[in-house]
Amino acid sequence: MVIPKALRDEVGIKGPTEVEIEEYNGDLTVSVPRIPAHVEMRDGLPVIVPEVPVRTMTAEDVRAAIDRVRR
């Protein structure tokens, strides 16, 4: 797949990069996974576990993320 340079620059793709492609109602969405992770079952529940060290989110971080999505 060829992604135009202007779009690569905008989303931060540099060199060979893994992307995720999803289909929804006949449309394709291409995204760059930001943090490599996998899912583990813990106490019977699925938990996303990052494969690299990440900063713990505070309550303020969570509120800001929710506000960004609601806009």
Image (spheres, rainbow, N blue to C red):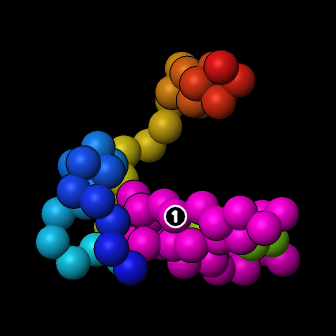
Which of 71 and 49 lies nearest the eye of the viewer? 71
Which of 38 and 45 lies nearest the eye of the viewer? 38
Three-letter amino acid code of the residue under disc 1: Val
Magenta: main secondary structure equals strand
Residue 51 % position (x, y): 39, 73
Asked if the magenta segment contains residue 36, the reply would be yes
Residue 34 % position (x, y): 39, 58
Residue underneath mark 1? 30
Say if 64 sits above or below 10 in the image. Answer: above
Which of 13 and 70 lies nearest the eye of the viewer? 13
Which of 33 and 6 lies nearest the eye of the viewer? 6
Element carrying mark 1 = strand
Residue 26 horizontal side relative to residue 68, left or right: right
Say if 5 sits above or below 64 in the image. Answer: below
Residue for point 38% across, 79% down: 1
Residue extent of the magenta highlight = 19-44
Residue for point 29% across, 44% down: 10
Question: Can residue 63 be seen in this snapshot?
Answer: no
Q: Quadrant of residue 71?
A: top right
Say if 43 sits above or below 6 in the image. Answer: below
Residue 25 % position (x, y): 83, 63
Q: Quadrant of residue 47?
A: bottom right
